[in-house]
Image (spheres, helix red, strand yellow):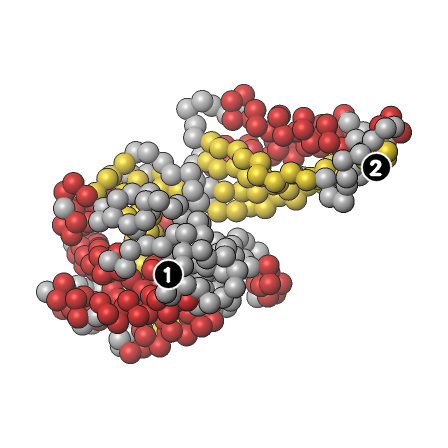
Amino acid sequence: MFQETINGIRDELTAIYKDLHQHPEPGYTEHRTAGIVADYLRRCGLSVTEGVALNGVVGVLDSGKPGKTLMMRADMDCLRIQELTGCDYQSQNEGCMHACGHDSHVTMLLGAAKVLSQHTDAFSGKIKFLFQPAEEQIDPSMEEAVRQAGYDGAGGAGFMIQEGALDGVDACVIMHCQPAIPFGTVQIAKRNACASSDLFDVTFVGKGGHGARPHEAIDPVPAMAEAIQAIHALPTREVSCLETCVISVGEVETPGSVWNAVAEKARFVGGFRTFNPEVRALLGRRIPELAETIAKAHRCRAEIRFLNGYMPCLNDERMAQAVAQSCREVLGEDCVDLTDTPAMTSEDAGEYLARVPGAFFWLGAGDPEHTLHNPYFLPSLDMIPLGVRVHVNNAVTMLARLNGAGL
């Protein structure tokens, strides 16, 4: 029933995907993408609300029969990465690329909306389709506009929720493409789907001087080195070995200095990831404490900027089981990995999962040579109709379970 409809719109969806891929837009600048989404949903007969969280789009498909409401989400933004794939539909926006597959997410969810709009007899209740801005981050060009609009968080999910996008929703299912798993398969975490992600930015301010006379200066570099060592020791000495925790320092610099000078400032930027809110709170407290104490010991001053990022994505275990079974019906028994192994990547979908029962899962993208966020990442076009089929079956199956008290 569904597959024939999907086959009939395959070329249409491929054209949409290629167009979106050619015109990537960073977080909260997805105006063109949002316009395409809203127009398409209206043509499918959905009730559409635009401008949610500046330029998010919400489409509601009502079966006309009483029942629960299921939410499904696609993120719309791109990354500021220069595309190097060389494909004939490569990005035309210099320095921007859909390196995380959000163009495919939008296309697949649009396809699901069209298919389901033609088969409302297959479900009861409503489906709310969320097309979200800024999953990756708030683009710097939009930071002021977002804050003036009254949102002080990170990522677009929290802003969408703040503006009521999750109102009336009983459960959610969120899919993300993933080149690290084989094409035609899905991977679903029973519980820990994605880790939290928080950022720390520390600058030690000393006193610059000549490299030949360091005793006349106050060198912030040894302080920075000691702080990095101490922070990296936190997971092994202050966090239980039974917890999953990662700390990474990815940026180190001495702004404006040269090799034969004692730097005035030394700066390092890093982040930490975990699934446990208590561990997250501990690291959020201890990292600034260590930086300040070590700075003082070295006669420096510490300037610390701390950014609360994304909360962990924690799947509802019953929803994860149900989505796994739904995917087996489409892909086959051996093509679904329901796993206890957590992924340490981060996703702001945790905002939704913290409020309603839901499941976040990965769909194989058919590009095993390149990870997400890679300038050569290019998912298989065959993933589009497959993802639509997975979405459609999930929607019908989950609503049947929700309405039948099976979840």
Q: Which comes before the other along the chain, label 1 or label 2?
A: 1
Q: Label 1 amino acid?
A: Cys
* Frontmost residue, 359 versus 261: 261
Residue depicted at x 64% and y 38%: 252
How far, Cα to Cα, is label 1 from label 2? 50 Å
Examine the image and state in which quarter residue 128 appears.
Answer: bottom left
**Residue 205 placement, left or right of 10:** right
* Frontmost residue, 219 versus 163: 219
Examine the image and state in which quarter residue 294 appears.
Answer: top right
**Residue 382 placement, left or right of 90:** left
User: Please, what secondary structure does the residue beneath circle 2 have?
Assistant: loop
- For label 2, the residue is 208
Instruction: Tell me the mark number nearer the camera, choosing from 1 and 2.
Output: 1
Give residue 127's position: percent from left, percent from top: 27, 64
* Frontmost residue, 323 versus 261: 261
Residue depicted at x 46% and y 57%: 83
Q: Label 2 amino acid?
A: Gly
Give residue 169's position: percent from left, percent from top: 33, 59
Give residue 5's position: percent from left, percent from top: 16, 68
Residue depicted at x 73% and y 31%: 221
